[in-house]
Image: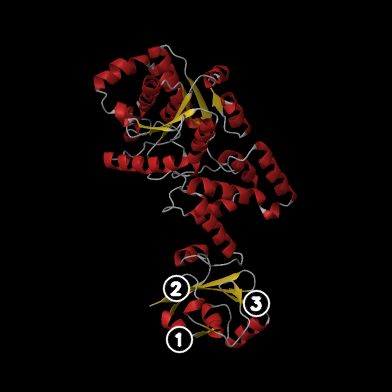
Amino acid sequence: MVADLLDELSWRGLLTQCTDEAGLRVYLREDEPRVYCGFDPTAASLHLGNLVPVMALAHAQRHGCTPIIVMGGGTGLIGDPSGKEEERTLMTLDQVEANVASQQGQLRRLLDDTGRNGAIFRNNAAWIEPLTCIELLRDVGKHFSVNAMIAKESVRRRLDEREQGISFTEFSYMILQAYDFLSLYDAHRCRFQIGGSDQWGNITAGIDLVRRVRGAEAYGLTLPLLTTAAGRKFGKSEGNAIWLDPSLCSPYAMHQHLVRTDDRDAVRFLEYFTFLSQEEIATVAARYETDPGEREAQKALAHEVTRFVHGDAELAKVERAAEALYGGSLDELTDEDLAEIFADVPSVALPAERVAAALPVVDLLVESGAAQSKSAARRLIESGGAYVNNERVMDAAAALGPAALAGRNTLVVRSGKRNYFLVKLTA
């Protein structure tokens, strides 16, 4: 079962490069193989792009491998130049520690840390901070050739930019990440590292250090960086990050982002971000090709990712909210939910006392903007096109009291199938 991990990652499109596939397959057949991945604490929350290595770790765990999650509490104080065209802004110790704590909390909810191959969490500050300058240069740095370091893509590209260049601080990052691999080999006998494709140079440097210092064979594998079919990257530096923290991107917002996934990306993202089998994804893809308008692939993607990141309870709530946008029940939705669901529709405020005194539905239609006049409102009701809280209004003489509210202080008015208007009651 374990040896099938590489095949799993391969068909999902998650295997970009591998240092020694034959040797790695042998290692994965050993008793309790371990794999590690580092997470850079440059933000308080992980985002959808970070979910690529998380999914790879989860697949590894399902195939019997023990995942080791390394939080960059030490390396985060330096900054990885990989994939960056200019120097990172250095963060304070307090910033790094806060981001490590926040990200680790998210990762603990995504990866199982129980059982025989439960996830192990480490912070590389534990072995990097005690290092003295002399120890780093004498015991670690002597194993690195500057010629080889300069040849690494992440360094060479920055050296070609004469105005920006690369500082000694960022140039040294590769040594510190390699030292992570050596430390994990010593503490956990870990001989396998994964990371984004921009980490190839850092990963191979670690493999080389383990071989030079301990005489052991280690392995590395890179994963694709998340991009759209149009070639655009996802991430905080790109300004289009889909955050995993619900306070930065609500479960509903995440779900809607994924439902709107470009047709060209939908099936590929199903392979990346779900545990659906190859056969299940093929079935979804076939239905999607038959009727793209139904967006079967996007709906499956939104369903699976929202459940994985936020859980079954939030998924159920999100899907009720999505149904509300298409005329479903508004029961159990809060004012906050309704405000988010209908964030892009016209909104007006009315004094709460208007409803307390029984608000004529004809007046509501006019004041919300659903009808231009009372006579137009009556015609709308008579034609069956007027709705309040997704329930059809049958009587033009009806009046609405507090019991008619959705949430505590909201009324959702609709004209026809898709013309929504939000009414918020104020004190």
Q: Mark 3 or mark 2, which has the lower sequence index? A: 3
Mark 3 or 2: in front is: 2
Where is residue 338 drawn, in percent x and y?
A: 49, 66
Residue 2, label in figure: none
User: In the rendered structure, are the residues bearing label 1 and label 2 in contact, judged by CB atoms less than 8 Å apart?
Assistant: no
Query: Which residue is labeled 1 in the image?
Result: 357
Q: Position of residue 34 (x, y in %)?
A: 46, 25
Identify the secondary structure beneath mark 1: loop
Tell me: residue 251, above or below residue 425: above
Q: Amino acid at mark 2?
A: Asn
Q: Quick one: label 1 or label 2, which is nearer the N terminus?
A: 1
Front-lying residue, 17 or 38: 38
Which residue in the structure is indicated by mark 3?
A: 385
Name the residue located 49 percent from the left edge and 37 percent from the top edge.
54
Query: Callout 3: few (<14), some (14-19), or many (20+) C-alpha neighbours within 10 Å?
Result: some
Left or right, 107 with respect to 28, comes to: left
Mark identifier at residue 409: 2
Q: Are marks 3 and 2 in contact (CB under 8 Å)?
A: no
Tell me the quadrant of the picture where the N terminus can be found: top right
Query: Mark 3 belongs to which amino acid?
Result: Gly
Label 3 to label 2: alpha-carbon separation? 23 Å
Residue in the foreground of this view, choosing between 181 and 135: 181
Quarter-of-image position of residue 237: top left
Identified by mark 1, the residue type is Ala
Who is closer to the viewer here, 2 or 374?
Answer: 2
Q: Secondary structure at mark 2?
A: loop
Q: Position of residue 131 (x, y in %)?
A: 27, 24
Q: Quadrant of the C terminus?
A: bottom left
